[in-house]
Image (tube, rainbow, N blue to C red):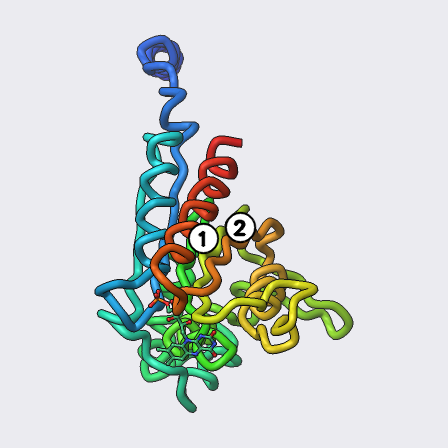
Amino acid sequence: MINVLFNLFILALLISKVALPPTDPKVLLMQTILRIDSSARHEDSHSRTLGDYFEKQWLNQNPDTKRLSRDLASHPIEHIQQDTISGFYTPLEQLTDDSIRATALSDELINELQAADVLLITVPLYNFSIPSSLKAWIDQVSRIGHTFSYDGERFQGLVKTKRAYIICTYGAAGYLPGNTLASANFLQPYLQFILNFLGIQTVHFFSLEGTSSDATTIANNVAHIKSMIDQSVSA
Ligand SMILES: Cc1cc2nc3c(=O)[nH]c(=O)nc-3n(C[C@H](O)[C@H](O)[C@H](O)COP(=O)(O)O)c2cc1C
């Protein structure tokens, strides 16, 4: 009897192997893009419009992409608080119901980030830095043991996202390296640093400067950024 059962088991195993459909190569190629918008404006926002353009070009090139998004202006991310921070530093086995609740949003945002192969952030320069809406998101996803580790000597990024594309908009011009306002740009160096710190090695910036200029200048600058996006997406 045991022999018969064993033979049946082997037969079932063989049939299941033969009957399994081959893995669809499209499933293997499927990527996830997480888009984060941070301009407080919905109307006339250059960063959102260029974000739409980037996404359209990306989806043309990579039609099997799964899309996730967060609009930090429509749905602001809560700032971290005392109990969020306590929860971040409490070992898993000691978490209470309260600390689990206090870190639930962070868990959700980190899961989203970890599920993304590609991160797209659209971000305006506000008072020489990033909008506080984006900083709130960064504070929720930058978490020891989850997105970075520290062994007493060195930090290591734990985010699996491979690449980030950052679309930045600046009212004035001259913020890029080597130019007159470069030392006042606390947006690009900060995002470059924090994303690398979290483990995202490749960070591309598309910087639209002079959005407060005249219409012709803006149109020329937008066309230039679009061509940079085209090149980058099709590379
Ligand atoms: C609150 C606020 C602060 C700003 N601070 C700066 C600044 O420090 N330097 C600058 O060049 N432009 C500044 N701007 C202009 C924006 O960077 C510019 O309008 C940009 O296009 C906004 O992005 P958006 O078009 O996607 O909304 C500021 C705009 C706002 C609303």
Q: Nearer the viewer, residue 27 or 178?
A: 178
Residue 51 on image: x %, y %: 35, 52
Circle 1 SS class? helix
The residue located at (37%, 24%) in the rendering is: 26
Residue 117 on image: x %, y %: 46, 45
Whether residue 77 is situated above or below residue 63 in the rendered picture: below
| Label annotation for residue 153 | none
- Crowding near pointer 2: few (<14 within 10 Å), some, many (20+)? some
Q: Is residue 172 left or right of 158 when viewed as pictured?
A: left
Mark closer to the chain start, 2 or 1: 2
Q: CA distance from mark 2 to mark 1?
A: 33 Å
Amino acid type, residue under disc 1 in the picture:
Asn
Label 1: which residue?
221
The residue located at (50%, 57%) in the rendering is: 207
Q: Looking at the image, which residue sits at the far right?
A: 153
Whether residue 185 is situated above or below residue 118 in the rendered picture: below
Residue 8 on image: x %, y %: 33, 12
Q: Is residue 158 left or right of 99 when viewed as pictured?
A: right
Q: Nearer the viewer, residue 162 or 15?
A: 162
Q: Is residue 173 left or right of 12 when viewed as pictured?
A: right
Whether residue 3 is situated above or below residue 123 in the rendered picture: above
Label 2: which residue?
160
The answer to whether residue 1 of the structure is visible from this angle is no
Q: Is ligand 1 within 8 Å of the beta carbon of the residue shown at mark 1?
A: no
The residue located at (39%, 69%) in the rendering is: 212
* Picture quadrant where residue 65 is located: top left
Q: Is residue 96 left or right of 118 when viewed as pictured?
A: left
